[in-house]
Amino acid sequence: MVNFAAAGVLGPSVFGHWVLLALVLQYSSIVTLGLSNAAGREVPIRLGANRGEDAAFVEDVTLGGTLLAALAGALAAVVVALLVMDPSDPHRYVIALLMGVAVATQQVYLLTQVLFRSRFAFRAMAGQMTLAGMVVLVSGLTLLRFGLAGLTASVALGYLSALLAAGALLPRRPRPRLDRAESRRLISIGFPIMLAGFAFIVLTTSDRWLVLAFLGREAVGVYGLVGMVASGLLLVASVAGQQYFPRMAFAFGEGDGGHELAAIARSQGRVTATAMGLVAVPTVAGAWVAVTYLLPAYREAALPLTIVAAGILAYAASSGFGNLLNVVGRQREYLTLQVLAIAVDLALVVGLLAVGAGLLGVAVAPALTFGAYAFVLRRRAIDIARSIPTDAGVLDGDPLRRLRAQANDRS
């Protein structure tokens, strides 16, 4: 809602700058080097194996490392924002500083989401997200008169409010702890997961950079509506993943085999596809109404956003199988599939732009890529799942069956 209002108030050219700044936020999670991703896998696995103290240790070390990464990310965000912004904008330094605050608070916010879902505290997590969303909505619409600076400030305020809520709602509040050995171990686990997630972000956002390169900044602003609809629909997949990923990791920690894990992945796909379909129809219809009557400067985005929405729906039913590959330790194979999809998408977009297909061609390429990627991901994940016997989950290099036997002996 804030972005639609901003598109109308700012116009395509200035809104194009906001689209690029938003990409800086999306890409910034790489600064943690996968610490949060590792915690999202390791904490529920340890809880499933009845190793609560080990799970708490992982949370504490992850928080310590994330705080350091947040500072580094803030500095990097200031520099990148200055490069993205128009040099003639008198508020570019204020916007860059606000972007640094937004990136720093975002890293800790993303970790709190991991901590909530790893301990299945979904109601508390929903309260945190609702508060943050309301703060962004109210502050964004209120501060919109200050242009890009107001929009950036609203994002930072949203993350700050979420962190305050997390302090009150987390089932266990971690204490920052620095441990080099454990941090290195977590990064070795989480870095491939993070890269796979980052590759997916690149897959879903690379079209905006190509539009900038081939068609200019104003076209980026127009195509920004397509990106907004895509991000809204992918949020549905993200919410479903937050529900299912810790459950799948917990089940793996308990010793469930590939058949059970694939069943969870299929369930996630069904729920995601159904929910996304219910959201996609009114979202696309509302976007058509908006560009027809309220945002005529963005009319060229109507058909592309419909095509992209169809491609994302094709992906939805297979979205749970990426979680499966991450849980069973096949992150590198998952990353390989992502990289191949990116290469196909880039080739299609460049080819269609070269023949003059414009924004419509930019939308067709990711839609086709999403469909093909979803099919290959599902087939490969199911093949891998078939090779995983019951009670074959691995923790710290030891089969869980042996860990349980050792625990029983100690008892």
Image (tube, rainbow, N blue to C red):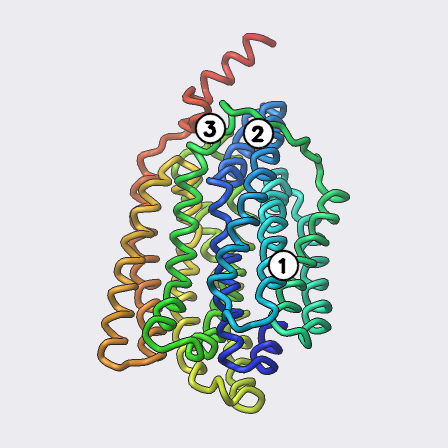
Residue type at numbered disc 2: Val
Q: Name the residue nearer the viewer: 317 or 234.
A: 234
Position of 403 relative to 134 (above/below): above
Residue identified by numbered label 2: 58
Q: Earlier in the sequence, mark 2 or mark 1?
A: 2
Q: Residue at x 46, y 87 (%)?
A: 299
Q: Residue at x 52, y 73 (%)?
A: 88
Q: Residues within 10 Å of mark 2 (few under 14, many from 20)?
A: many
Q: Position of residue 184 (x, y in %)?
A: 46, 28
Residue 98's disc number: 1
Q: Nearer the viewer, mark 2 or mark 3?
A: 3
Q: Picture quarter containing residue 147?
A: bottom right
Q: What residue is drawn where x is 58% and y is 44%? A: 70
Q: Is residue 299 left or right of residue 69?
A: left
Closer to the eye: label 2 or 1: 1
Residue type beneath disc 3: Arg
Q: Position of residue 379 (x, y in %)?
A: 30, 50
- Sequence-first tag of 1 and 3: 1
Q: For numbered disc 2, what is the local secondary structure? A: helix
Q: CA distance from mark 2 to mark 1?
A: 31 Å
Residue 79 in picture, x, y percent from top left: 51, 55
Pick the front one: 279 or 369: 369
